[in-house]
Image: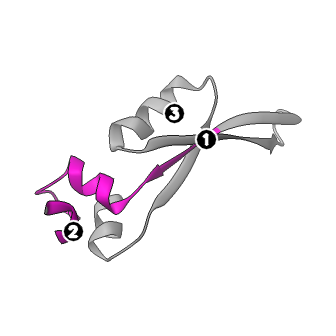
Amino acid sequence: ALIAQHFRNGGGTITGGYILGNAASRNVQLKVGFRETHVEVKPSVPRGTDVDVMQMELSPEDWGRRNPDGPGATTQART
């Protein structure tokens, strides 16, 4: 619902990420429509070390292709 509202209100690309090896987080983001873009090394305070994080993004166009008639679908994505 929040993602649909974001795009319905003209919001831009949403970014996110998951620590490599965290299949549950990866699967949730892929199910919503995020796509993997690149890996970044980021500090993890709880782990006390750097971790590899797969960066993800969900563009209005990607959202519209996955949800052509759903809430938040953009006119541009429907064409």
The residue that mark 1 highlights is 38
The residue lying toward the viewer, choosing from 65 and 17, is 65
Q: Amino acid at mark 1?
A: His
Disc 3 packing (10 Å; few <14; some 14–19; many ≥20): few
In the depicted structure, whether residue 36 falls above or below residue 16: above
The residue positioned farthest toward the bottom in the image shown: 9
The residue that mark 2 highlights is 76
Q: Which residues are magenta?
A: 54-78
Give the residue at x 62% y 22%.
Answer: 21
Asked whether disc 1 touches disc 2, contact meaning CB atoms under 8 Å apart, the reply is no
| SS state under label 3 | helix
| SS state under label 2 | helix
User: Does residue 76 appear to the left or right of 25 in the view shown?
Assistant: left
User: Does residue 39 appear to the left or right of 68 in the view shown?
Assistant: right
Q: Amino acid at mark 3?
A: Ser
The residue lying toward the viewer, choosing from 60 and 50, is 60
The residue that mark 3 highlights is 25
Q: Nearer the viewer, mark 3 or mark 1?
A: 1
Across and down, in percent, residue 43 comes to: 82, 43
Labels 3 and 1: the sequence-earlier one: 3
Disc 2 packing (10 Å; few <14; some 14–19; many ≥20): few
The quadrant in which the C terminus is found is bottom left
Give the residue at x 47% y 59%.
Answer: 14
